[in-house]
Image (tube, rainbow, N blue to C red):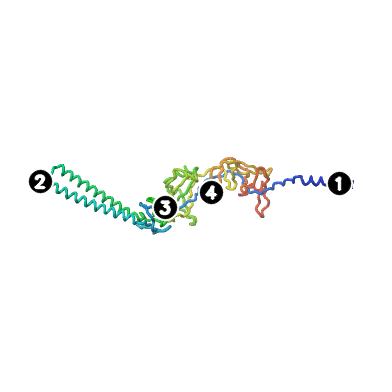
Amino acid sequence: MRTSFPLLAGMLASALLAGCSRPAAEAEPVRAVRTVVVAAQSAGGSAEYAAEVRARTESRLSFRVGGKITRRHVDLGDTVKAGQVLAQLDPQDLRLGETAAQAAVRAAQVNFDLAAADLKRYRELRDQGFISGAELERRQTTMQAAQAQLEQARAQAGVQANQAAYSSLVADVAGVITGVDAEPGAVVSAGTPVLRLAHDGPRDVVFTVPEDRLTSVRALLGRPGAVQVTLWGSGEQRMPASVREVAAAADPVTRTFLVKADVGNAPVRLGQTATASIAQARVDNVTKLPLSAVFEQQGASAVWVVDVPTMTVRAQRIQVGGADGRDIVVTGGLQPGQRVVSAGVHVLTQGQKVSLYAEPGSPPATPASAASTPR
């Protein structure tokens, strides 16, 4: 027993030390990555923007008087004609006001007739020498005041008649109802939008451009065919358009500028989605990378560059000069011949070991054999 105790103590100490020791860190896996080789290229072609077909003129229709909406005669998407009644207010109070104004006209007419008769009698009395000229002037002034009151009452009656007619919301021009802002039962004040009406006539294709393209787009104002419009769902058929209007200020949310391109009376539908293409001058000696190759690092654009001798990656900041289709145009930060990771950049870390990805069924890729592999 005495001879085995030191042996047991040693075994227990070894077990405790083995339990307290930290496990060895696992080696970081070698990731297979797709890459592209940096080479001087030409950028240009055309810039494409998502656009929407809108009416040249769209009005927000409202009642010219306040009241309760009793009926709405049109629905969203309805085609209306000029003079068509679109909605109706409760006209009861307006009709009562019109009746009161007509009664005021009749009362003013009676006062005027009485003043005119008095003036006639007093003129006869003055001619006979029974009254003075001053008394006749007073009667003449009374008649003139009665005449002015009659004219005022007639004008007020005309206003009240117009107010009664304003209880019907009438379309000024032909067009299409593109929005409904109030329903029957709502009490609205004068000028509250009730319906939106897109006028028949020319159509615009509307899209937004970033600030760096603003100068070049403004240079196209009024130039026929400067914009090519392709309607979604119509194949590759294009129609020419000209830039008609460019917003003077940026949208406060998107910080982009609204552009309206005129397509005239082309056979397009309101709200139809389209692609607006603007040709751009070609620029040589630039680098184009897929969008998936670029990531953000400390507020700047960067890419992963593969160090071929060690097959590790390092972050390299770049200067982005814009976009060319689905590619990013790089104007600085890279040298021809460098190999850049084109996919999976979000899973890489500085100095990580990588291997070149090979398509299934193809021989394993090497830095030398993959130099001319397309992305």
Report, in whole angstroms, how far the alpha carbon at label 1 lies from the one at label 4: 76 Å
Q: Position of residue 314 (x, y in %)?
A: 64, 42
- According to the image, label 3 marks what residue? 55
334 w.r.t. 197: above or below: above
Which of the two labelled residues, at mark 4 and mark 3, occupies the earlier sequence position? Answer: 3
User: On the picture, is 222 further left or further right than 127?
Assistant: right
Whichever of callouts 1 and 2 sits on the residue coming sooner in the sequence is 1
| Amino acid type, mark 2 | Gln
The answer to whether marks 1 and 2 mark residues whose Cβ atoms lie closer than 8 Å is no
Kindly report the distance in space between the C-alpha atoms of the residues bearing marks 2 and 4. 103 Å
In the picture of the structure, the residue carrying the numbered disc 4 is: 325
- State which tag comes first along the sequence, 3 or 2: 3
Q: Residues within 10 Å of mark 2 (few under 14, many from 20)?
A: few
Residue 66 at x, y = what percent? 37, 52
Precedes in sequence: disc 1 or disc 4: 1
The circle drawn on residue 128 is 2
Q: Nearer the viewer, mark 3 or mark 2?
A: 2
Q: Amino acid at mark 3?
A: Ala
Q: Nearer the viewer, residue 369 or 117?
A: 117
Q: Name the residue that disc number 1 marks.
A: 7
Q: Mark 4: which amino acid?
A: Gly
In the picture, residue 81 is in which quadrant? Answer: bottom left
Using the rendered image of the protein, determine whether residue 198 is visible from the camera's viewpoint: no
Instruction: Give the secondary structure at mark 1.
Output: helix
Mark nearest the camera among 1 and 4 is 1
Q: Secondary structure at mark 2?
A: helix
Say whether disc 2 or disc 4 marks the residue closer to the N-terminus: 2
Q: Dot 3 lies on which element?
A: strand
